[in-house]
Structures are given as structure tokens and as C-alpha cells.
Image (cartoon, rainbow, N blue to C red):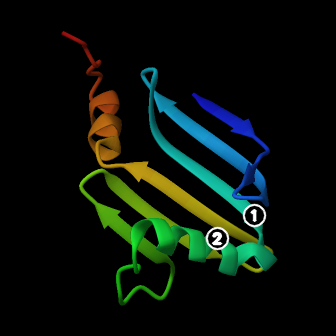
Amino acid sequence: GCVSHEEKLDGTATREIRLHFLNGRLYQFSLSAEVQHYDAVVATLQKRNGAPRAGDAEALRWQNEAGSIAAYRGKDLVYVNFELGSYADAVRRKREGQTLECN
């Protein structure tokens, strides 16, 4: 499922925050903001996560054991995607018809 909400992040008005759930668990979320906020969004990400990985012209990217972040600058919008490290496995399990069980 997906939940969408308009919000502010550190005082910067975002266009939308979107939460993606798979089998009742949050695995991915994204936000978009007006492009004039790109520098503020990137500064906040760098402050919290350090310098992005080098060598990617398409997006600024951060990754650690918990997950990954990708920030894209479009013509009108900034789009940032946050994905938990377990997301790809959850999608694969769902496609294979497996369900998550809690013990």
C-alpha cells in the first residue's frame, strides 16, 4: 500500500511525502519538493549522512547497512527516495508468493 501526505521537512515545504508498505511494513518512502529547495534538501542529507558516493551523474546517493538514499534534481522538482536495505528482498519474496511471518 501507499500513503501520501503533504508536509514540511526542517521548515522546507515539501510537495509530497509518500510511504510505501509491503505486507504491513514500511520499506520505502520518498519526498518531493520544489526545485528551488534543492540546495537545502542536499545540505540536510549531507549533514545527516555525510558526503554522497562519488561518480554518479544521475543522482546523489548515500548508502549504509540500513538502506540507501537517492536524490534527483529535475526541471521543476527535487525527488528523494529512501529505501530500507531489506526492500529488494521483500519485493522478491512477494513476487514468489512468500509471506512474512513473525515468531
Q: Residue 53 carries which label?
A: none
For residue 103, what is the image quadrant? Answer: top left
Quarter residue 98 falls in: top left
Q: Name the residue under label 2.
A: 41
Residue visible at 29% across and 18% down?
99
Residue 95's spot in the image, x, y percent? 33, 32
**Secondary structure under the numbered disc 2 in the rendered image:** helix
Q: Position of residue 16 (x, y in %)?
A: 75, 50
Relative vertical location of residue 55 with respect to residue 69 in this rendering, above or below: below
The kind of residue on which mark 2 rests is Val
In the image, 100 versus 60, the foreground residue is 60
Residue indicated by mark 1: 33
Q: Residue 51, how many percent across, how many down?
A: 40, 80
Q: Which of 57 and 64 is in front in this view?
A: 64
| Residue visible at 52% across and 68% down in the picture | 45
Q: Please report whichever mark, 1 or 2, sits nearer to the chain's N-terminal start.
A: 1
- Please indicate whether residue 19 sits to the left or right of residue 64 in the image: right
Question: Is 59 displayed left or right of 50 in the figure?
Answer: right
Seen at 68% across and 47% down, the residue is 17
Q: Looking at the picture, which amino acid does disc 1 mark?
A: Ala
Q: Do the residues labelled 1 and 2 touch (CB within 8 Å)?
A: yes
Judge the density around disc 2: few (<14), some (14-19), many (≥20) Cα neighbours within 10 Å: many
**From mark 1 to mark 2, how far is it between C-alphas?**
9 Å
Q: Nearer the viewer, mark 1 or mark 2?
A: 2
Q: What element carries label 1?
A: strand
Quarter holding the N terminus?
top right
